[in-house]
Image (cartoon, rainbow, N blue to C red):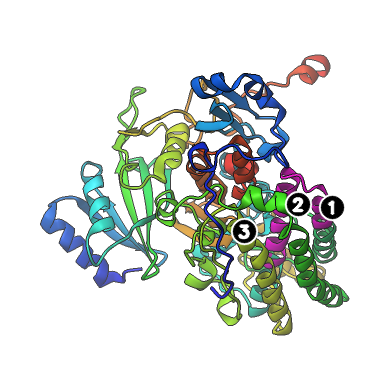
Amino acid sequence: MPDAPGLELIRGEIDQRRPGAVVDTSFDNERAVLVVDPAHLLAVLGWLRDSPGQEYAFLSSLHAADYLPAEPRFAVHYELLNRDRVERIRVKALLADPGDEALPEIDSCVDLFPTAEFQEREAFDFFGIVFHGHPDLTRILMPEDYVGWPQRRDFPVGGEPVTFTYNERRYG
Amino acid sequence: MAKSLQDSASSAGGVAAGGPRGAEGRPAPSTVGVAAATGPADQRSEVMTVNIGPHHPATHGVLRLVVDLEGEVVRELRPVIGYVHTGIEKSCEDKSYWKVIPFVERMDYVSFFFQMEAFCGAVERLVGLEIPERAKHLRVIFLELNRIHSHLVWLGTTALDLGAISMLWYCFRERDRILDLFEMATGQRMHTRYFQVGGVIEDIPLGFERKLREFIAEMPVRVGQYEALLDRNEVFLQRTKGTGVVSRERLLELGVTGPLLRAAGEPWDLRKAFDYLSYSQFDFKVPVGTVGDNYDRYRVRLAEMVESTRIVEQALDGLPEGPHIADDRKYVLPPRSELSTSMEALIHHFKLVTEGYRVPPSEIYYAIESPRGELGCFVLADGSAKPARVHFRDPSFVNLQAFRDMSVDGYIADMICSLGMLDPILGGVDR
């Protein structure tokens, strides 16, 4: 993975092209992290994927997390990998909760990384994050008529009623 | 990279290139009987949508496929998943760290040791706990035994799909010996809860080494026997060679890892690329294919079983003396013998069992090479004794996206073959 100066170099190059795209950088458990503005996400991901010297062409994992009570509350993590140099870098886009049933929104990266299709659906399914431009943004693991975003931190564990209620009715 | 795989003739699944082939060894699943019964003219003109699964033996678990068929040719395919979603990731948020281990084992229920290693390794890195050398070697032994076990389950069930029924019994015979070894060392045949944060729960028992050596002496012979049974089996060869081909570039775009990617000629293995546990000390090869068809996938996995046996042998030969678990009482239970003599040990034991240990706020993504590819574990710690999020990047889940590319414009029989060679474990896909 890029070391601390390497990470700052990457930040500097992105800042030249897209001022304000990188909000923050950090080193978390020896993993270089770029925190980016969701509005510039695709530009940053595309630059990291294609520009010579970077070539983080493999998206290992895309997952969401809920940092409640922190604000902005949600984050989408992109674990990028350069297989030739065996380097990983994490791109993190922070999303605020718009409140009032409205859903946080971000651009879909399926065009850049086709592997993101299932994983973006999963993030939508469990966190209610809307990915613009996704070809088929539907629930993937929960039933399609399900209401709610079960892996948000304010969704209770056990908030799901048990459907096999015969014994409860009979034996109380 | 040494295993040069036989080049297969490009018979190309698909009507245009191959034409209708002979009827031998092509038992179509009963659900497509309707399509096969209609006349030849209708087969060309009409596209019929057929639902396969979720309860169908050839879907290897609870996988539902919505398939558009033109005659016997698959024109479009959509996997529908989620039928065994049990909310394990959510449940983990309500358990202290050490109680999460048995939960995550049950995701991909065939490679339970790998789930444990992904989670325990992630937590060890979060708290900065170094595990002893002996524990690393023991973990490697059990991980590689588990890899052989997983590949045996794959080989048995996939060969069964292709009509080679006896393969299932032979594979499960050896699988049972691995489970016997697991039982001997851990007390459980599956879902062993053997790995702990800090090392492994207890040392291997007396007599284990002898039984393990018997097994690793025998396993390469058994793999040779499987090869002898399948490699000149005309039915097996016709159904695997040239079917389900996806190019290396497309597989990489789709995020496919593991034997599927290696069969397409890409020598990518996290055991070699990243330094985790003690894999860098062992001499083993990464088998790759040339064509990327179903036959190469079969050859790669077979060769991997032999390589895993070699790793187990080396780990056993070089097994260092010393403790099997780290000696950090803030994270690791004290030895049982101390509980009756040391007040401090009793306090530590009580604190660990009741509240658990706290992990400072941070996050980590830790990936290892599972039998199906990159198994990543994301853990988000918020400073309490319970993880704020545990997410698994399951290789079956990601690899399943390649299934459409493998199957479209091929026969439905080739689709069944490709599904077996994809080796998805739906417990891991749905979590």
- Identified at 56% across, 48% down, the residue is B243
In the picture of the structure, the residue carrying the numbered disc 3 is: B371
Q: Where does the image place residue A138, in percent across and percent down from the top left?
A: 44, 28
Dominant secondary-structure state across the stretch colored magenta = helix
> Residue farthest to the right?
B207
* Residue A44 visible somewhere in the drawing: yes
Q: CA distance from mark 2 to mark 1?
A: 7 Å
Residue B5 quadrant: bottom right
Against B55, residue B201 (above or below) is below
Q: Where does the image place residue A39, in percent across and percent down from the top left?
A: 21, 41
In the picture of the structure, the residue carrying the numbered disc 2 is: B156
- Identified at 54% across, 58% down, the residue is B258
Q: Secondary structure at mark 1?
A: helix
Residue B347 quadrant: bottom right
Q: Where does the image place residue B316, in percent across and percent down from the top left?
A: 73, 79
Is B342 within the magenta? no
Residue B169: give its label: 1
Against B16, residue B96 (above or below) is below
Judging depth in this view, the residue of A141 and B153 nearest the camera is B153
> Residue farthest to the top?
A169
Residue A13: give its label: none
| Marks 2, 1 in one chain | yes
Q: CA distance from mark 1 to mark 3?
A: 21 Å
**Disc 3 marks which amino acid?**
Pro
Q: Secondary structure at mark 3?
A: loop
Provide the chain ID for the residue under circle 2. Answer: B
Q: Give the magenta range.
A: B143-172
Q: CA distance from mark 3 to mark 2?
A: 15 Å
